[in-house]
Image (cartoon, rainbow, N blue to C red):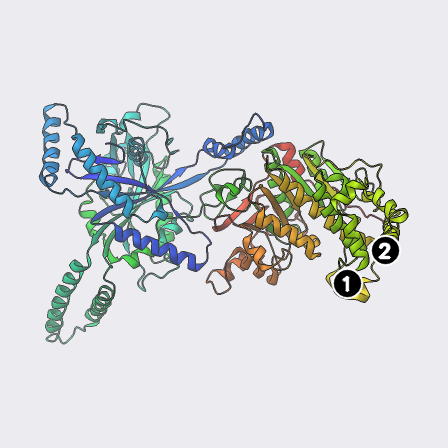
Amino acid sequence: MSENLTWTRSGTVWATFRIRGLAYGRRPQKDKVAVKNLHRALIRAIKGEAVLSGMSVSLDPAEVVNAQIAGVNLEMCPMWAEEALENLTRLDELPLGQRVFYVSVPLANPGRSAWTGPGRAALSRIQDAAGLPRTRPSDLDIEMRRQQSQRIKEAIPAMFDPQEISVAEQVWMFSRHQSRGLLSFMPEREVELAELVTTSGVCLPEPILDEGCVSELESRREYNPLKRRVMKVTNVNAADLDDSPPSYQALLVMSSTPVAGVVFPGSELLDRIDGLGPEVDWTIRVKINSRDAVMKANRKAVRELNDQYQQRDNEATLGSHDLDAAADLLREYEQIFASDRLEVEVAHTIILAVGADSFEAADTQAAQVQRLLNADDFEFQRPIGDQESLWWAMHPGVAGGPIVQAYAHPTTSDKFAMLVPFTTTRLGGSKGPVAALNTTNQRLSVVHIDPAGYPELDKSGAVVAVGELGSGKSFFLKTMSAHLVSCGANLFVIDKDSGGEWAHFVQALVPDAVIVSSEDPQWSMDPLRILPNAGDAAGVAHAFFTTLLNVSPREADGVTLGQVLDAEYLASHELGSSEALMRYLETECELEGAKDLGTQMRNYARTALGRLVFDASLPPVPHDADAVVWRTHTMDQPTAEEISHAHLFRTLSLTKVFGRAYYRLLTSTARRWCFADRSRASVFVTDEAYDINMNPDNALDLEHFVRQGRRPKAILLTGSHDPERDFGNETTRKLIPTRIVMRHTDEDLARSSIRFLGVPEDDPMFEQLVEILRTDTSPVDGDSSGGVHADRRGECFIRDAFGTIGDARILGPAQPHLAAAVTSTPPKSKTVI
């Protein structure tokens, strides 16, 4: 072996590539068709023979945690180090898994290698028999094979990201076949074995194969081949180790496909296997026949069929229904290959393998897989006496033998591609916070959601959660906030909850967080004092007072307000606070309408809410605070109807007018603070987006996070109930990459949420997703059971930043004190204004 190359005893050299699975899961049909077409291109790129493999392996929790902390300076972020340690303990208790894919292709023997390759293999056998050292391939031969391997890699569609595996991974693959059903982790990518020189096959683990597990019987008289279709595999190299028990395996082979033919979507047999329960490895041995060879064979078959028709003419009792069916198939085949000059024939044999640590477990799992797949009209058998042959057929470099030919199914590349073997339900990225468990199928995996890292991939870090009341939106948003702050981000939150839900959580996360309460102000939100940049301060103050005083920039009072709130004017008149500005307008300013503006400001300054802006004795909120929470539970905003009708707008209460202007102040301030600090990520959380977006100006600030937040790592986390009304315009909604959809029992809102995921109503899967969202996503188990069962909380659909859609269950923080803060809700209390 050398790198991804293997020299075999038959004289054939094989090249093996690891293949990236294409995102599939709950994606809409148009995306699935694109995945199928990529598989068709892949199979057409392969010439001759190939072995396609999908191995189900355990996912090492340490590997997950390494991805969680990747790129984070743990010395600067001790909270994240603690979270990682706690998460490692939590993940150790979960059966995490993943599937890895391989394509192995025999290389052609061109020129002299047509006889030197088999000759070298024959010489190796003689040397082995004589006890002589083997002859390694020459450097010239190795280089030629590398070039052949490179050409195959270049022919594979780039979306599959083919990578040459190492010798270490080749050794692991052989070992994996001998340890199926036992704990098995992928080797570290950095571990290499003699990459620049060839490595002898003696480093491969040597198996002892016991078909029927006969060695465990007390007497051979007990042997019943019908009841012992399991093979015991023992690794000789590890047989004497107590922690290396034998592997009990059962091999199945596909014997027939649905009578009505495969349909797409719906024919994803290998993807369906991952949802069965037992861990299953699969191998597809394929033999590609060219179009010309198929057309020639088809014409021969037609001649033979005509002969059979003539013979049947003389048989009075036999009909020709079977011949008619065969003729129809030949005619269809002829049409397909005649219309597509790139089409090839794919003779494929599908082999499945289950493994366990006991005979009974392997036998039970194989029977379960066989029963479930046969129910879908894909018939699988466990042929007696052929378990060993099927086991060897799953190895690249081993000849398939008669068993592979006996169960081969010829079809076109287009039909074969409908199996879409190289797909994955993986959600999220490859690193960052562990936000959820992927529950799309029976194999649990983790979901990394990394809003702070997506800007480096030229993607927005905005994240949206939608769902009905009590579905878990706040739980998710708090979890993400905790992760981002633990990684070094600063946090700004609008908390409308009357019990101070977010204030309570943020104080547990950041003990010295600044809590700005509208009920009993301890901090000032004076725009002229909280923004260090004079231009920003003047701009935010102008937006706030224009909204508060309802003045038009084109009328006299609006012009005056604009002149006074110019940064140079404020500096020259030493107007460093809103209180000073109010007094100046009342008594000193000679501009038109100035006194009236000052009087209106005084009217608001006298109110309890007005202290937030006009009380100069309060300290200003520091712009560089690690966390700020603005509690707005005592404020109201005008409805859309009140804003759009002049007679209703004129009668608005001072509370509503001030509330509308204050929200304008908060979104403007948060935008400038988050965009100003480029040294770390900044997070702005609005748990009730509908409340913010009542004012179109606020919606523009949130839209700015989505459109422009990528460069300064300004991250928007927001949630609400109706995705088509609560998150601004359609363009803004489409630009939000990461979308979390939680329970919605209302049908209209459920349909709206599934559309928001990116699944159109005409997609075959749409109605099913709506029903799952309404009835089987964190279902409430009656009013006497405490609501949602603990094991079902946090269930959702996730559309990740890369467009993949799948099922998930949100994981809260691993640290106990943060987990308690995320899940706790302060008691509600009525507030009298």
Q: Amino acid at mark 1?
A: Glu
Q: Nearer the viewer, residue 365 or 342?
A: 342
User: In which quadrant is the N terminus drawn?
Assistant: top left
Q: Nearer the viewer, residue 549 or 792?
A: 549
Q: Nearer the viewer, residue 126 or 350?
A: 126
Residue 751 location, x and y as percent? 57, 61
Evaluate whether residue 302 shows in this view. yes
Query: In the picture shown, does residue 184 fall above or below 390?
Result: above
Residue 694 location, x and y as percent? 71, 57
Q: Nearer the viewer, residue 177 or 6?
A: 6
416 displayed left or right of 712: left
Label 1 residue SS: helix
Label 2 residue SS: loop
Tell me the number on the disc at residue 642: 1
| Distance Cα–Cα, label 1 vs label 2 | 27 Å
Query: What residue lies at 41% left-to-right and 41% top-to-bottom?
Result: 98
Q: Specify the quadrant of the image occupied by residue 300.
A: bottom left
Q: Amino acid at mark 2?
A: Gly
Identify residue for label 2: 593
Q: Specify the quadrant of the image occupied by residue 115.
A: top left
Viewer-side label of 1, 2: 2
Query: What residue lies at 32% left-to-right and 49% top-to-bottom?
Result: 157
779 displayed left or right of 335: right
